[in-house]
Amino acid sequence: MRIVTVKEKSGIPKYKQIVASIEEAIVTGTLKKGDKLPSLNSIKNQNSLSRDTVLTAFNELKTRGIIHSIVGKGYYVNSEEVDISQKIFLLFDEFNSFKEDLYNSFLTSLGDNIQVDIFFHHFNNDMFNRLINDNVGDYSAYVIMPANLNNTAQTIERLPAENVYILDQTHPELKNYPSVFQNFKKDIYKGLEAALEQINAYKKLVLLFPAARQPQGIKDGFLLFCAHHRIDHEIIDNLMNRELRHGELYIILDDKNLIRIIKRIKEQQLSIAKDIGIISYNDTLLKEIVEDGITTISTDFNLMGQRLAQMILNKEFAQVENPNRLIIRKSL
């Protein structure tokens, strides 16, 4: 049975007619998930087309997730959901409460008929490389969160440049891609400066900075702030065996260590704010409530998701620095 029919002078591009023919075959049940499609050459010869025309049609269906290819065997129906207009590859470093806000905002802002597949590299270079290499050519857009991994540009270059978007943390070698990002160095400097009056009530500012997972810009901005304002400071990579001392103000970058330091404060029978100050990075609903409120320096993750979706829908090239602010609560 002939699956693809292309008409001359129909006013519809020929590759679009191929796409429509395959979609119709799926909708009517002529083609089902797992079925093999006619070969590129057979469609080309039957309809007197160029191979590029047929390949363009197949690539559109492939990036929407409707078909997939198996090297040396051909193309197969991958999904019967032909109403999917775009299929987006979303690579996060990890999943946590504020990344969930970002993810949900992104999905809501995209609207209907767009499929988003989410993956995680967990700050592992090998995992990062494998996930991208395994999905080259399978999506209409690629959203990449490179975090602080090294040499990510070499892997990202394997993707179609016009379909790549960088999210949250960017690097100089990724400057040619559209992005929505945080300026970590400026954000922590400005956030701490906005809290300078409260910070001056403490004897020492301590940054808990596990370098393997945190942006270098946070450390740079912290050191710059302390130097400019001549503030006694210390950088540590963990809380193990550390005795908290009255008058210390801790900047905590992740939620696990936030819980650990609150527990340690209670164990040492100290008081939050009065004895030990806390500033946490990245705001969540929980931080509004825990210990009557934890002071945060945070970007707007909902806005980040909305802006990213807008860029993809409009095929817009932009490099957007997401806004950040200090929220003072009772931990300071």
Image (spheres, helix red, strand yellow):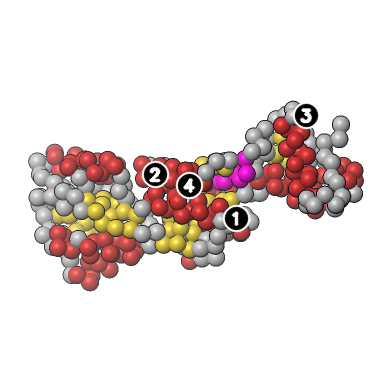
Q: Which labelled disc corresponds to residue 101?
A: 2
Q: Which label is found at residue 241? A: none
Q: From the image, state whether disc 3 or disc 2 is nearer to you.
A: 3
Closer to the chain start, of discs 3 and 1, is 3
Of mark 4 and mark 3, the one earlier in the sequence is 3
Indicate the secondary structure of the residue bearing disc 4.
Answer: helix
Q: Give the range drawn in magenta.
A: 84-90
Q: Residues within 10 Å of mark 4 (few under 14, many from 20)?
A: some
User: What is the three-letter code of the residue carrying label 4?
Assistant: Ser
Q: Which of marks 1 and 4 is nearer the N terminus?
A: 4
**Residue 26 drawn at (x, y percent):** 73, 32
- The mark nearer the N terminus, 3 or 2, is 3
In percent of width and height, residue 116 lies at 54, 42
Identify the residue under disc 1: 163
Instruction: Name the residue located 12 percent from the left edge and 58 percent from the top edge.
Output: 202
Vertical placement of residue 321 versus 27, above or below: below
Taking depth in this image into account, of 30 and 62 the one nearest to the observer is 30
On the image, numbered disc 3 is attached to which residue? 30
Amino acid residing under circle 1: Asn
In the image, taking residue 303 as reference, residue 256 lies left or right, namely left
Q: Which of 112 and 328 is in front in this view?
A: 112
